[in-house]
Image (tube, rainbow, N blue to C red):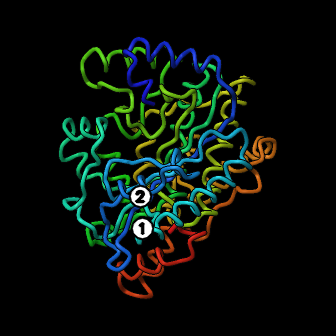
Amino acid sequence: MGDQQRLSPEEQIRSAREAFEDGHDFTIAVEEEFAILDPDTLELTNRFEELKAGAAGTALDENLVGELIASEIEVKTGRCANFGEVVELMAERRAQLGELADRFGVGLAATGTHPWSRWQDQRIIDTPHYRRNNELLQYVVWRNNSFGLHAHIGIRGADRAVAVANAFRNVLPELLALSASSPFLEDCVTGLHSARTEIFTKLFPRCGVPDAYDGWAGYEEYVRFLYATQSIDEHTQIWWSVRPHLAFPTVEVRICDAQPDLAEAQSLAALIYALGARFARALDEGEELPNLPPRLIEENMWRAIRYDLTGGLIDFERGEVVPARARIEALIEWVLPVAREIGAAPYLSVPEPNASERQYQRLAEVGSHRDVFAELVRRPRERVGG
C-alpha cells in the first residue's frame, strides 16, 4: 500500500481502474485482527511493536501488521488463487501468531471487542497513517478498540467490481448476524450481540452501509469529490463495510466481527467468497440484483447488532420478517452451485449457536462476563488463535 499512498489522487484512481480491468476473478485474501493480552490479567497490553520486531526474518513477518492500537495485531493470508489455499493459510497464520505470542509471554483473543479494558489505556501505534487518523478523528479513533475479520475477493472489471460491491450491501446484515462475537464492552453486558459495530461503524465517518453506485464512473466521482473537498487525504479513509479497494483489484468485505473459532472463521470466509462469485455470475448472466436503499439495509443491520441469529431479518422481497438462520440458509442455498465450483461448499454452515450466543449462554451459567472471556481465550490455540 505504500506505493499507492505516494501516488497523487488522480494517479491512484487511474491505477486502480487499470488494475481492475486487468484483474483476476475470485482470488481471495483474509485478514484477522487479534487482541494482545496480559496472560495473567487478560487486560489489553500494548506490545505490538515487540511482536512485530520478534517476527522479523520469520515466515510470519510480511503477513503481520499493526492495526491502530498497540494492543492489537493483524495477520493476513496474502492473496490466494483458490479457497483451499486460504483455508490452510488461515490455520497456519493463527498457529504462527500463537507461537510468537508464546515466545513473548502474551495472550491473544479473537472477539469483536474486549469485555472490560479501557480505551483510555490503549496507545495509537506510531505510523504516519495512524498519526494522521489520530489527528483527524480524535475521540472517534481513540474509542475504536475493536477486532474484525476482512475478506478481499478478486473481481475482474471496474464496473463489475462496483456492481458486486453494490450487491454485497444487501447481505451485510446477514454476514454480521452470522459473525457477531462482541456482547461485552466497558465491563458491561451490553444486551447487544455486536457491540463492535456500534463503536466502529456508528462513530467513524464514511463507514457502515455505502450508497450503491452506477458503475465505476459514479464511484470515481464520489472519491474525487472527497479528495477535492479535503474530506480525505488517502483512500483508506473510506471505511465502508464493503468497498472496491483502490490499492488492490478486490472487493473488500469489512462487516464481520473477529471469530474465536478457526473453523467458523473459515466458514465465514467461505460464504463471503461464494457470495462474491455468485454475484459476479449473476451479473454475467443478466440476473437482476437489487440495490436496496441504505435506510432499509440499516433496519436489518440493527436487528443483526441487537439479536444476531436469535432474531429475525426482514425479507424485502416478501415484505416480512423471517428467522435470521433461515435467511442465511437461503443465501447458502443460492450460492451453493457456484460454491461447489470454487471449492467453498464444504465449509458453508450456520453455527448453532454462534460466538455471541455461546458467550451469553455461558454468562447465564457462570454469572460473570469476565469468566466467560477467560474461558474463551484459554481454549486450545487452534480454535482461538491464542
* Image point (52%, 60%), residue name: 97
Mark 2 nearby-residue class (10 Å; few <14, some 14–19, many ≥20): many
- Residue nearest the observer in this picture, 211 or 116: 116
Residue 171 lies, in percent from the top left, at: 55, 43
* Image point (21%, 39%), residue name: 137
Please give the count of numbered marks on the rendered protein: 2
- Residue nearest the observer in this picture, 127 or 377: 127
Q: Quadrant of residue 146?
A: bottom left
* Image point (37%, 56%), residue name: 72
Disc on the earlier residue, 2 or 1:
2
> In terms of secondary structure, where does tag 1 sit?
helix
Mark 1 nearby-residue class (10 Å; few <14, some 14–19, many ≥20): few
Horizontal side of 56 relative to 280 (left or right) equals left
Residue 363 lies, in percent from the top left, at: 41, 81
Residue denoted by label 1: 104
Residue 217 lies, in percent from the top left, at: 48, 13
Kindly report the distance in space between the C-alpha atoms of the residues bearing marks 2 and 1: 7 Å
Horizontal side of 287 relative to 111 (left or right) equals right
Q: What residue type is labelled 2?
A: Leu
Q: Residue furthest front?
A: 57
Residue 12 lies, in percent from the top left, at: 44, 17
Q: Residue furthest bottom?
A: 366
Q: In this view, does 328 lie above or below 19?
A: below
- Residue nearest the observer in this picture, 365 or 18: 18
Image quarter of the N terminus: top left
> In terms of secondary structure, where does tag 2 sit?
helix
**Are the residues flagged by discs 2 and 1 in contact, CB closer than 8 Å?**
yes
Q: Which amino acid does label 1 sit on?
A: Phe
* Image point (18%, 47%), residue name: 139
Residue denoted by label 2: 51
